[in-house]
Amino acid sequence: MISFLDLAKINNRFRSEIDARFARILDKGWYLQGDENESFAKHFAEYCGTKYAIGVANGLDALNLIIRASGFGPGDEIIVPANTYIATILAISENGCTPVLVEPDIHTYNIDPDKIEAAITPKTKAIMVVHLYGQAVQMQKVWDVAKKYGLKVFEDCAQAHGAFYQGKRVGNLSDAGAFSFYPGKNLGCMGDGGAVVTNDEELYKKVKALANYGSDRKYHHIYKGTNSRLDELQAAVLDVKLPHLDADNARRREIAAFYRKNITNPKIILPETYSEDAAVWHVFAVRTEERDRFQKYLTDNGVQTIIHYPTPPHKQGAYAEWNDRSYPIAEEIHRTIISLPMSPVLTDDEVAEVVRIVNEYK
Ligand SMILES: *Cc1c(COP(=O)(O)O)cnc(C)c1O
């Protein structure tokens, strides 16, 4: 079986370094908000090109804290793509804000920047873009419309660590970026983890305090905060892996280029990219009419696949109030999409084998 994502193989490349860091933590007996967090936050901000980074408990909390620290709540609307992992939308709901869904572009699968303006109302406060499947949103039109209406812009970077737009990395393209380090992400830890990055000092301080019981110093609480911390073990894993992220992303690009050049089956629609450095190929999502038949064929031939995602957020039980709505482009993507194996540890032979099997599909 060619596995979709072999996490043991990915992390075992760094086994001795991770072992050494864990031993250091055991020796010190310091598990939260210590040197590992400080080191990783510094390195991750440098990597993204932002002034600040804060480790938090997971990607959903990172999104949540950005919205909360910006002071948005009930009565406020936030624009978000209809085609995303549900976490982006849940973070808006959790703050009592209203998510306003905007259709994606059928070619990039990201929010269609030309459709944002029509969704703006006097209640709109922010645009939350998602760099889906690892491709940076083409931000220029997003910035233009945000500027015209005085809106904040935020990024969900959970699938796009290291992707570029106009020479800057995601996370550094807006007021604040949210990252997830869920194990399967391009930069993943060994449990849950997340980060907020920003150039805004005030936002940075507020997120940092909110994530730590609303406390700006010990036993001094200025907000009704929460507990959302990245623990020292996870920060250590991330600090070990971060220097290898660009090489891993380069390998993903190599595999994506091979797939795009060699998959010639007319039944398969390949993903498009507008610039090489814009995409870090978190997943390699293709589309095909009889998606479920294609998936069964691949499984029968030893190729593991995953569907990102089978049901759009507006058709989920969690958003029953939206179930009658129609977002035809988002629905078309969810109906036809399927992700082929993609990871930095796939071998050339495995990639060639996937291509052969996909091309033989009838
Ligand atoms: C993974 C993911 C999240 C949530 O991250 P968690 O760390 O699992 O909370 C949010 N948005 C997108 C687009 C994701 O892929």
Image (cartoon, grey):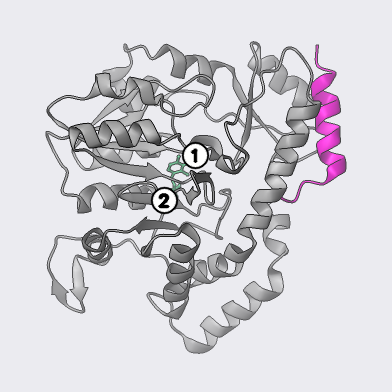
Q: What residue is rendered at 17% in x and 44% in y?
A: 72
Asked whether, in this view, residue 252 is left or right of residue 116, the answer is right
- The reply to whether residue 224 is visible in this rendering is yes
Q: Is residue 231 left or right of residue 96?
A: right
Inspect the image, locate mark 2, and give the three-letter code of the amino acid beneath it. Gly
Residue range highlighted in magenta:
344-362
Q: Name the main secondary structure of what is drawn in magenta.
A: helix
Kind of element beneath mark 2: loop
Q: Residue at x 51, y 20 (%)?
A: 334
Point out residue 226 in the picture as x, y percentages from the top left corner: 24, 60
The verdict on residue 279 being magenta is no
Q: Is residue 343 visible?
A: no
Determine which residue is flagged by label 2: 171
**Element under label 1?**
loop
The reply to whether discs 2 and 1 touch (Cβ–Cβ < 8 Å) is no
What's the amino acid at mark 1?
A: Ala
Q: Is residue 84 above or below residue 266?
A: below
User: Residue beneath label 1, please?
Assistant: 136
Find residue 303 and report its image quarter.
top right
Residue found at x 46% / y 51%: 180
Residue 246 in percent (x, y) is at 63, 56
Is 349 covered by the magenta stretch?
yes
Q: Is residue 60 above or below residue 213?
A: above
Q: Please name whichever residue, 246 or 230, is drawn nearer the observer in this view of the structure.
A: 246
**Labels 2 and 1: the sequence-earlier one:** 1
Q: Residues within 10 Å of mark 2 (few under 14, many from 20)?
A: many
Question: Where the N terminus falls, by quadrant?
Answer: top right
